[in-house]
Structure formats: structure tokens, C-alpha cells
Image: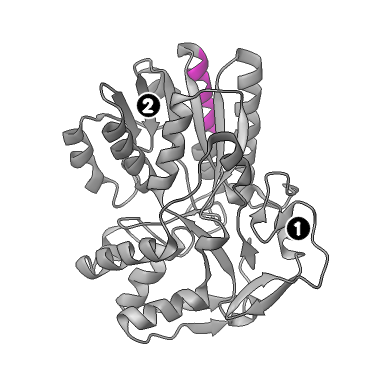
Amino acid sequence: MKVLITGACGFVGSHLARYLLEAHEGLTLVGLDNLARPGSETNRLALRQLGLRLFHGDLRMASDVDALPPVDWVIDAAAQPSVLAGRDGKTSPRQLLEHNLLGTINLLEYCRTVNAGLVLLSTSRVYSIPALSRLPLREEAGAWTLDPTQPWPNTVSREGVTEAFSTESPISLYGATKLASERLAQEYAAGFQLPVCINRCGVLAGAGQFGTAEQGIFSYWLHAHATRRPLKFLGFGGHGFQVRDALHPRDLARLVDYQLRHPGPSQVLNISGGAANSMSLAQLTAWCDDHFGPHQPVADGSDRPYDIPWLILDSTRALAATGWKPEITLPQILDEIATHTLANPDWLNRCGA
């Protein structure tokens, strides 16, 4: 089998590469990365030594993609990953669209030309911000949770939101590029009989992540807390009750490996740590206080664009379709990040956070 990973030197791409090289004897693995993000260079040599054939190129350039050798599968792990991209003053809307949408178009054309399947890594942020904000919540143990005394939509439960949850706008410019990429991938699957898997990932977290406050929040929070960087509880009263779930990229890699081995009809799956791996920022801060000593975030109730109070993904469909469920627990993820944090106190500076 021949597999191409885009964004191969990134946090997720490098984990996928390592896992697949370990799991598949005789696998030919090709990587594409523009190495633009601070920190990505750290993975380059190690992946080459494991057997990855790395091409330095940009997904936005059709000529770079067209120059790649033919493969059987493409795993798209390249993206502008911040939900604030296009509005954060660091990237323009055009840059976001070129990275996340034009890049998908170039990949789909490549897949059509070489008759390759596609595993598209999408995001939980395709779900409607107003619909999420309307969910009935109450505070329990320093975290928002669904209020059982109020009615919920039938697309949400204590396990999280399902794939049928609303994707109505607004979902952020970032979310819109990923949702549009999903739709295009589905059309290519139907129009050209290409196997396509669309995985809507929750918050990915683990040691070595190039975390920032806009994405990679678990990794960023531990590194910032341990090095006494300023931290803020933004929005929602400034209490830090907002909740997300965490997924280790090796758990994602297990699913992707299954999808490569068992191609089937195009489907959209929520892939996340789920309710058991969820935590609020206030709870995460308490965990950090126990491990690194007290460091109190500033309470700032001001709102940011696209922030949401609660989002956990229900991965029941993935379990039914593939037998997959996360195995790495949130305490294991946090312990792994903490070990890396103590060994790399300058990490946030090195990865440009």
C-alpha cells in the first residue's frame, strides 16, 4: 500500500506517520509539508529516519501536488487549524481559504487523477455556534453540563452532539472552509467513485503539540501554566466553565488505519475523546495547580468571536461502523503533556505560541 500524508510534519500528521509505519509492513509512506509552522522542522529528520519520503511543497500550489508520486490513499492532515483564522490579525481570510479549501480542491483533483482514496480530517467546529449556544446548560463541579430539567434537541445527549446536529451558519470562517471541504469530498466520492472517509475530530491533545490558545488548548494551558505565562478565563462570566473533550492522535491513528484497511462507502464520523475525556478550563486549571503549583488565571468576561460554552462529540456512529472508541484516557493525556512540559520549559517559545 502507498499512502500520502499532507501536513506530515505537523503534530497530527507526524503521529499518523509513526503509527502507520509501525502497523504496516512494506508500507510506502509519502509526506508533503511546507514546513512553514514553527515546530514542524523538529519532526522532519525523525520521520525520514523512520522511512517517510518527505516532499517539501505547498498544498495550495497545484504544481506541487501534481508532482507527487501516485498513491492508493491520501490522508489530509494539513490545515490552517485555528478557529480564529481569518479574523485573528495573523492570517487573512484569503490565506485561510487558500490553505483549507483550495488545498482540498488540489488534493481531490490529485485523488481523481491517480484514483486514490481520501481520508479527510475535519473538525467539530462545523457545528452551528448559535445552536450550540442555545443548549440548556448548568454548572456542576466547575463545568458546564447539559441541564436535565430542560428539553434538548434529539441530536444531542450526555454523550455529546451527533453528526446530525445543525451545521447552520455561523460556524466561523475556519469551520466554513472545513464544511465546504467535506461537501466537495462527498461530491468527488459520488461523481468519481472514490473512497472517502470524513472524520470530524474533537480537540486533539498530546505531548509535542504546537499548542496555542486558539487550538491545542490542553497542551497550551499546561505549558503556559507551568511557565507562569498569563492565562485568562475568557467569556461566559470569566469562570472557566467552558467544556471540551480531548483525543490523543494515536487513537485517531487507530481509526485511520482501520479505514485504510477496510474501505467502504463514504461516511461522516465524529471522532473524539467523548464525555469521559472532557474537562472545563477551571477543572484543567485545578489539575495544573496540583501538578505545577498555584497559578490563577485572570477572569475576563469579554466575548471572543466563535467561542462556545460546551462541545462534546458523540462518537457512537464510529463505534457502530468500525468498532472504534478512544483508549487513551484524559488523565493519561495530561500526564504525557506534563512530562513533556517539564522537560521542555521553552516549548511555547520554540513553537511560536
Which secondary structure is most common in the magenta stretch?
A: helix
Residue at 57% across, 56% down:
87
User: Whole-Å distance between the Cαs marked 2 and 1?
Assistant: 36 Å
Quadrant hosting residue 353 = bottom left
Q: Look at mark 2 in the image and give the residue it sits on.
A: 4
Q: Nearer the viewer, residue 91 or 166?
A: 166
Question: What kind of colouring is applied to the model shown?
Answer: one colour
Left or right of 25: which side holds 121? right
Residue at 36% across, 57% down:
206
Q: Secondary structure at mark 1?
A: helix
Give the amino acid at mark 1.
Answer: Ala
Q: Nearer the viewer, residue 110 or 221?
A: 221
Left or right of 219: which side holds 189? right
Residue at 56% across, 77% down:
240
Residue 336 shows up from this direction: yes
Q: Where residue 109 sits: x, y (%)?
A: 52, 19
Which corner quadrant holds the N terminus?
top left
State the extent of the magenta-drawn residues as a range.
101-112
Residue 173 shows up from this direction: no
Residue 205 versus residue 110 in the image, above or below: below
Q: Which mark is residue 131?
A: 1
| Residue 107 drawn in magenta | yes
Left or right of 169: which side holds 8? left
Q: Where residue 160 sits: x, y (%)?
A: 65, 57
Q: Secondary structure at mark 2?
A: strand
Give the amino acid at mark 2.
Answer: Leu
| Residue 352 drawn in magenta | no
